[in-house]
Image (tube, helix red, strand yellow):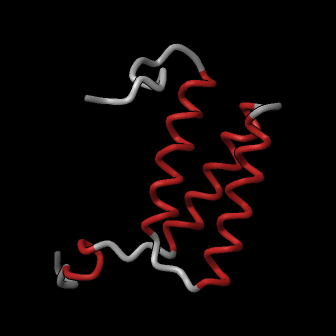
C-alpha cells in the first residue's frame, strides 16, 4: 500500500515539484559518489528544497539543472553494459 503523501494525484505545480524532489532524493541516495561529492550534492539538494518553499517555479528550474548534473554521475547498468553498437 502506498503512503498517503498527497503525491498520488497531480493537483498543482507544488505537488508536481514535490514528486520530482522525492524522485531526486532517491536518485541522490542511489548515486555512486565519493564522500566529498555526496556532501556537495546533498547540500545543493537541500538548497533546492528550501527554495521550493518560497518559489516553486525557480526551484523547478534549479532542480532541472541539478538532475542534469547528477545524470553525469549516474552509473546505471544500461550505460555500463551496452555494447557501442546498441
Residue at 66%, 64% (x, y): give it.
Answer: 42
72 with respect to 62 (left or right): left
Where does the image place residue 10, in percent across and percent down from the top left? 46, 18
- In which quadrant of the rendered view does residue 12 lie? top right
In the current view of this chain or complex, which residue is farthest to the right?
54
Residue at 46%, 59% (x, y): give it.
Answer: 27
Where does the image place residue 58, in percent across and percent down from the top left? 76, 38
Question: Is 19 or 82 nearer to us in this picture?
Answer: 19
With respect to residue 42, does 63 lie above or below? above
With respect to residue 65, does 10 lie above or below? above
Residue at 47%, 26% (x, y): give it.
Answer: 5
Residue at 25%, 29% (x, y): give it.
Answer: 1
Where does the image place residue 46, in percent across and percent down from the top left? 72, 54
In the current view of this chain or complex, which residue is farthest to the top?
11
- In which quadrant of the rendered view does residue 78 lie? bottom left
With respect to residue 60, does 86 lie above or below? below
Quadrant holding the C terminus? bottom left
Where does the image place residue 3, in percent across and percent down from the top left? 38, 29
Amino acid at each position: 500500500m502506498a503512503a498517503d503523501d498527497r503525491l498520488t494525484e497531480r493537483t498543482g505545480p507544488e505537488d508536481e515539484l514535490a514528486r520530482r524532489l522525492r524522485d531526486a532524493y532517491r536518485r541522490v541516495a542511489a548515486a555512486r559518489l565519493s564522500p566529498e561529492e555526496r556532501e556537495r550534492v546533498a547540500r545543493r539538494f537541500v538548497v533546492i528544497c528550501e527554495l521550493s518553499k518560497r518559489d516553486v517555479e525557480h526551484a523547478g528550474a534549479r532542480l532541472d539543472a541539478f538532475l542534469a548534473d547528477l545524470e553525469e554521475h549516474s552509473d546505471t547498468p544500461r550505460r555500463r553494459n551496452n555494447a557501442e553498437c546498441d
